[in-house]
Amino acid sequence: MQPRRILCLDGLRGLAVLMVICFHFQQMFGCWHGLLARLAVWGQTGVDLFFVLSGFLITGILLDTRGSEHCMRNFYVRRVLRIFPLYYATLAVLFVVAPLIGLRDAQPVSRQIWFWTYMQNIPLTFGQSMRSDPVHFWSLAVEEHFYLVWPFLVLRLNHRSLLRAVLVMIAASVSCRILLSQYSTFYFTLARMDGLGCGAALAVLARDPGGLRRLVRPAWAVLLFVGSGLGVLQLALSGSRLEILQITKSTLIAFVYCALIVLAVGNRLLDSVLTHPALRNIGKYSYAMYIFHPFVLGGLKSTRLPSSSFDLLLAIAFTWCAAALSWFALEEPFLKMKVRFEYAPRPLAVAVSA
């Protein structure tokens, strides 16, 4: 028996990667102005949505399978099969194949090692320029660091203690952004644990009596007051003039996306939008689309054609094609191996797949 899949979360993955693509498109092409440009900046929070989703899904799986045979082994093997093949294949192309055929300059091993060991967000935090490398991989490093620690806490703590642990994670993230304010804490693992922690807390609450249904009203309140407040500040000020917002916005954004998950699961209209086949299909390929999209955008930029919003549609289409090819040629063969490491949930578990 495998954890059941909540289909609308595939749509949320699709939404998250589209948001990130829009943000990087505006960064690279700069063809939008005024209101549209400020809306595009919000696309950066697609990474926050990924973090919240990861915390929610991973914690849910761990809660529903703890106590079963080989639960930790199965968890880590399944994560490796999902993440490593595409990640390391991409690094091999960038750092080995491309320099050999003259497509990019060779990078010293001392620079590459950060990526091979999932530590690339460390030099980014402390000011080392890595522009010629896949900078967007920083978020993959943050998630890997989360996977190294959090499963052991989930398997050893009860629900109340896990919620306390999340509070510690949020406090540590905010404190880190204060103490290291002179650095780029946007990339730093400890400074980004609040999003993953909020998603984890939501997974714990979903398994208490009443589940997510009892959170619908609070979710609407968060979306109405916190979400609209952040939106107004973004449109009016871009948030750059409020230091307190720079410190707390990551946590506030995580609250908003937790609320969105609650409503997506419990609201028929939102669920129908997020379960649209097109959006779910993009969600299916979201991991590869996230990895490939900066290279596609760079390729389009290098054509030096007049930039327009049409380039965004081209970027999404080309990125989707590359991701679909990756899925069938590389990812799916490894994912089929998951059947050898199936989870064994408790009979009454309410689980989700990742």
Image (cartoon, grey):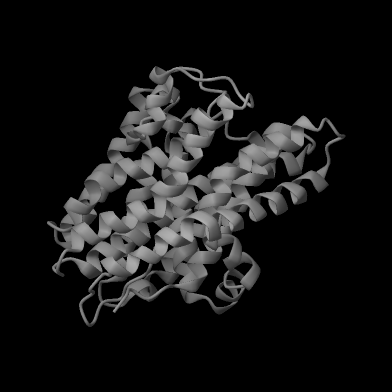
* Residue 183 in sight from this viewpoint: no
Left or right: where does residue 243 sit relative to residue 300?
left
The x and y percentages for residue 309 are 81, 45
Relative to 242, residue 9 above or below: below
Q: To which quarter of the image does residue 116 belong?
A: top left
Left or right: where does residue 37 sit relative to residue 146?
right
| Residue at x-position 32% and y-position 50% | 197
Quadrant of the snapshot with the C terminus: bottom left
Is 4 in front, or is 91? 91
Q: To which quarter of the image does residue 240 belong?
A: top right
The x and y percentages for residue 232 are 62, 45
| Number of dots carrying numbers | 0
Is 169 in front, or is 235? 169
| Residue at x-position 64% and y-position 45% | 21
| Residue at x-position 45% and y-position 35% | 138
Quadrant of the snapshot with the N terminus: bottom left
Is 86 in front, or is 142? 86
Is 182 in front, or is 78? 78
Relative to 71, residue 294 above or below: above
The x and y percentages for residue 217 are 44, 70
Left or right: where does residue 155 sit relative to residue 206?
left
| Residue at x-position 48% and y-position 52% | 49
